[in-house]
Image (tube, rainbow, N blue to C red):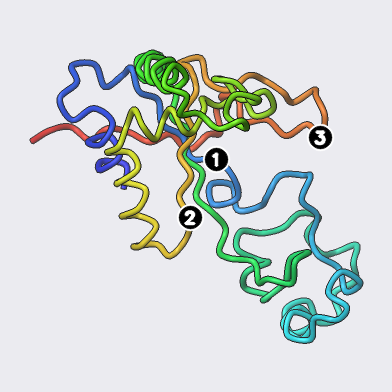
């Protein structure tokens, strides 16, 4: 998966080190961030399928001994319904791509789309760098790097879950561990780092 991603990003590039790829989210660390609590019986009231699966899973385990946060795919496996009454799908796969080279190309595409009036109001409101999440505008990324979109589609079909690549400058996402809910995806030594396999 990593090898095919690097082929999509820089199949003929001379400096693959300009592209930093990391896995984020619960599929990398098994548990979701601290802002996503483990479900309770109360939350599952009125959802008989999810309640039964939860009971099979937890049995008589007291709340104090249960996980504090959601494990990967847990809401989907429970058959839990969201606030709109729809079943949760599989957890997505978060790919964090950091590259000043790609950001520059995405910026040029953003300017082109903006001049042509092809950006949505939401795109304009959130800006080229998303105001809340700090990733590069997804519309600009999608238009600038169609091979990345094709790569995502292939792996979504193979894995049966959404694949969500997000682009950041080479410095990576900013450290937001001291802000809001404390969830941050800045570089850490514990990160799962994707590598570009050597060419044979």
Nearer-N-terminus badge (2/3): 2
State the SS at label 1. strand
Front residue of 129/41: it is 129
Residue 184 in the image: x percent, y percent?
68, 30
The residue that mark 1 highlights is 24
View extreme (left): residue: 200
The residue that mark 3 highlights is 181
In the image: residue 65, left or right of residue 130: right
Residue 113 in the image: x percent, y percent?
42, 23
State the SS at label 2. loop
Residue displayed at 67% across by 76% down: 79
Front residue of 162/123: it is 123
Quote the CA–CA distance across marks 2 and 1.
13 Å
In the image: residue 140, left or right of residue 127: left
Quote the CA–CA distance across marks 3 and 1.
17 Å
Residue 199 in the image: x percent, y percent?
12, 33
The residue that mark 2 highlights is 162
Residue displayed at 15% across by 25% down: 12
Marks 3 and 2: in contact by CB < 8 Å?
no
Marks 1 and 3: in contact by CB < 8 Å?
no
Quote the CA–CA distance across marks 2 and 3.
24 Å
Q: Nearer the viewer, mark 2 or mark 3?
A: 2
Q: Residues within 10 Å of mark 2 (few under 14, many from 20)?
A: some
Quadrant position of residue 131: top right
């Amino acid at each position: 998966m990593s090898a095919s991603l690097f082929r999509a990003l820089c199949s003929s590039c001379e400096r693959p080190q300009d592209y930093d790829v990391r896995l984020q989210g619960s599929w990398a660390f098994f548990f979701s961030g601290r802002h996503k609590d483990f479900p309770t019986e109360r939350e599952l009231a009125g959802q008989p399928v999810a309640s039964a699966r939860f009971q099979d899973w937890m049995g008589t385990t007291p709340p104090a001994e249960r996980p504090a946060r959601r494990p990967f795919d847990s809401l989907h496996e429970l058959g839990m319904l969201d606030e709109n009454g729809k079943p949760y799908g599989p957890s997505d796969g978060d790919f964090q791509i950091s590259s000043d080279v790609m950001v520059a190309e995405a910026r040029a595409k953003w300017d082109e789309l903006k001049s042509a009036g092809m950006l949505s109001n939401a795109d304009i409101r959130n800006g080229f760098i998303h105001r809340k999440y700090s990733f590069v505008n997804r519309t600009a990324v999608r238009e600038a790097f169609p091979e990345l979109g094709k790569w995502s589609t292939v792996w979504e079909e193979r894995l049966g879950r959404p694949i969500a690549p997000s682009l950041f400058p080479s410095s990576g996402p900013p450290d937001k561990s001291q802000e809001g809910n404390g969830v941050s995806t800045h570089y850490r030594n514990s990160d799962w780092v994707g590598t570009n396999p050597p060419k044979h």
